[in-house]
Image (spheres, rainbow, N blue to C red):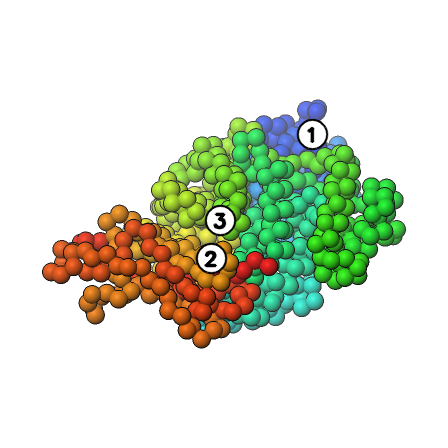
Amino acid sequence: MRVLLSVIAISLAAASLADAKDTTEQSRPGGGYRLASEASPYLRQHADNPVEWYPWGKEAFERAKKENKPIFLSVGYSTCFWCHVMKRESFEKEAVGKLLNADFISVKVDRERRPDVDATYMIATELITQRGGWPNSVFLTPDLKPFFALTYAPEAEFTQLLGQIASTWKGEEKALRADATRVASLISRVMSRKQAAVKITPELLTRASLTVLSGFDAFNGGTGTAPKFPREQLLSFLYHRAIRDSDAVALDAFELTLDNIIRGGINDHVAGGFHRYATDNAWAVPHFEKMLYNQAQIGRLLIQAYQLTGRQKYAEAARKTFDFVLRDMTTSEGGFASAFDAETDGKEGLFYLWSKEDFDKALGGDAPFAAQVFGVTKDGNHEHMNTLRFVAPLDELARDAGLEQKAFNEKVEGVLAKLRAVRIERPALRRDDKVIANWNAAMIRTLTEASVVLDEPRYLQAAQQAMTLLVKRLGAGTVDMQRAYFEGTTGLAASQADHALTGLAAVALYDATAEEKWRDLAKKSASIIIDTFADPDSGDFYLTKGETGFVRTKQYDDGDLQAGNAAALELFSLLTRRDQNPRWGHAADGLAAALGGLARRTPMAMASTLVAADIHERGEVGSRQSLGKGAVRISAERSKDGKSARVILKLAPGWHINANKPTEDFLIPTVVKVSNADSNNTGAIDYPTAIKRKLGFHPQPLDLYEGTVAIEVPASQLSAKPTTAQRLTLSLQACSDSLCLEPESAELLLPAISR
């Protein structure tokens, strides 16, 4: 029988497709009535199915044990197209409902609310089928151990499979339980895998970079082949390599990928925002759902690219993304909605696609020009329709059109305005209004950083409003924090990743505003991680407070966002420079040791861990930082003409640093150096006049800096053509009247001149 199941698994895997969702409202009661009040649009979509669905929980598990029936676990999310297809083809059918209700206990899970369940049983699917995706369909013993799995399957194959599994359970239950025990054991080993401690050195990062770049698409950017995901964490790693170690190859790969993404069909040129991934190598045809986490992460990468290169195209793409989020993804209470659906009347992408006829009708006399720019043809590039993408770099398109760049850009904007006016009249896509803690935190962090880089106060206002919602509705900063909020309902404990990402967002808010409440929130989040989620045997952290089925989950690998353990390591590392509590440094040391060996072996999966570990070892590289355990706030900025720069230090009351030329030789001077200039560094850096102050530990007055200090860096010290960001190294020793901290330094990022 197991041989037969394996044959079916192969055929189903061949037909298997990943990802999708349906947000169709239901009106009649059904077997899944238990889902009707769940705080999840995805679960509610199945409330009127003839299938007797249960949410994940004791009621379902106890019934499975009492009746000795296998559990059918179905995991998906509200914007998942193929989840919707399987719902229509199978779960809405009375015949399928009868089969499931007779021989199985059926459980529905929203992966966005339960990342622990999703992670645990996706490993099972990958082990059994050698692939993954959603909907994820897993068959479990009553004690929640998986023995068979598949993703999408058409109705005929699914019903055949149900009959065969039911028959096998009745005749070979012992064998299936043995198989389940073996799979569960493998999953437990994956969740608790350990490696010897390894320090993340610059040499190790170089080797990891070569591994990442070995699978790089040198023509289109990105890694791997279709379907092609942005893989934001890998791009973030390449960015970190570019600014930390001046890795030119990493910078080229980073820019090439972003250039193709913002030019391609994965970018919604009409209204802003990015689709989840592309179905082709050239980023031309997207998988049409839009997820909040993509907007947060790609938006942050665009801001970083703008700082690094000064290229306006990155700033413009970022602004368009943030405008989309603030306009279309912000809930009435100021949180950020999870996603937009991909389908209209069962047709994926119809909202975004254009026939040549509709395109020409919308644009009139501009249609020939626009068709050349966006590659619109009668045959189309996706099911006889057209996705909109720039078919070449904009400077080439302007030259081909015989226009100056400014005139070309204005004409394109006029075309897009006409298309927006037509598209907005189409049936609106459904929006999943779940406010998910770590997704919102990622968006808050991005908007906060963007508010500084782009000088946009409204981004900071939106970020603060969303964080206030996380505190008020989800209990951010408390041990009882909840993961998600939907229509006034929470009821699901936050994960370790929720606390970690919230802490990182709070650090960003603190850096931007200097408001202590945000640093306090970051500290509370970090303390909860240490006190609630720690694995004392390994030094890392569990994802949940308790077991998920048969195992307590950990999150090592990057997924939709950076892994929970990586986020915790970054949070602890940032707090060591912003707060005097030594526990952050101790926690970072232990976690870095626990993760280093794994990250060395699997850099593609743990790119964010490599970045966090390097921050722990060598500090940050950014334009706003802290030293002196938070006593010294520092920033670097260019002059208005871009030629010179200044480093600004703001010291807390009661704290000081030594002047550039201290009174005594044994005192540590405050020094700024330009790390990667291409000039002869002929001009002297201008330090302010010192303050004479007598301190208790020294009989004579000392030359000190207090309060706000500005150190001027002349143009002659900087690159003559600052088309990429530069690094300034600031060294100092922070002291109070009673103690001096260890000497320390920070690498400050001086953004490139806008161009």
Return the mark for residue 639. Answer: 2
Can you name the residue that lies furthest to the top here?
Answer: 28
Q: Is residue 695 left or right of residue 708?
A: left
The residue indicated by pointer 3 is 452
Closer to the camera in the image, 186 or 240: 240
Please tell me which residue is depicted at 62% across the width and 37% down the height of the picture.
Answer: 327
- In this view, the mark in front (3 or 2): 2
The image shows residue 312 at horizontal and vertical percentages of 61, 55
Q: Disc 1 marks which residue?
A: 25
Tell which circle, 3 or 2, labels the residue nearer the N-terminal end.
Answer: 3
Looking at the rendered structure, the secondary structure element under dot 3 is: helix
Residue found 88% across the figure and 51% down from its top: 378
Foreground residue among 145 and 544: 544
Three-letter residue code for mark 1: Glu
Lower position in the chain sequence, tag 2 or tag 1: 1
Q: Which of the two residues, 722 or 503, is positioned nearer the viewer here?
A: 722
| Residue type at the position of mark 3 | Val
Observer-side mark, 1 or 3, equals 3
563 to 617, vertically: above or below: above
Residue occupying image coordinates x 71% and y 57%: 405
**Secondary structure at numbered mark 1:** loop
Q: Say above or below: 719 vs 288.
A: below
Q: CA distance from mark 1 to mark 3?
A: 41 Å
Q: Left of 699 or right of it: where is 55?
A: right
Q: Which quadrant of the figure has residue 283?
A: bottom right
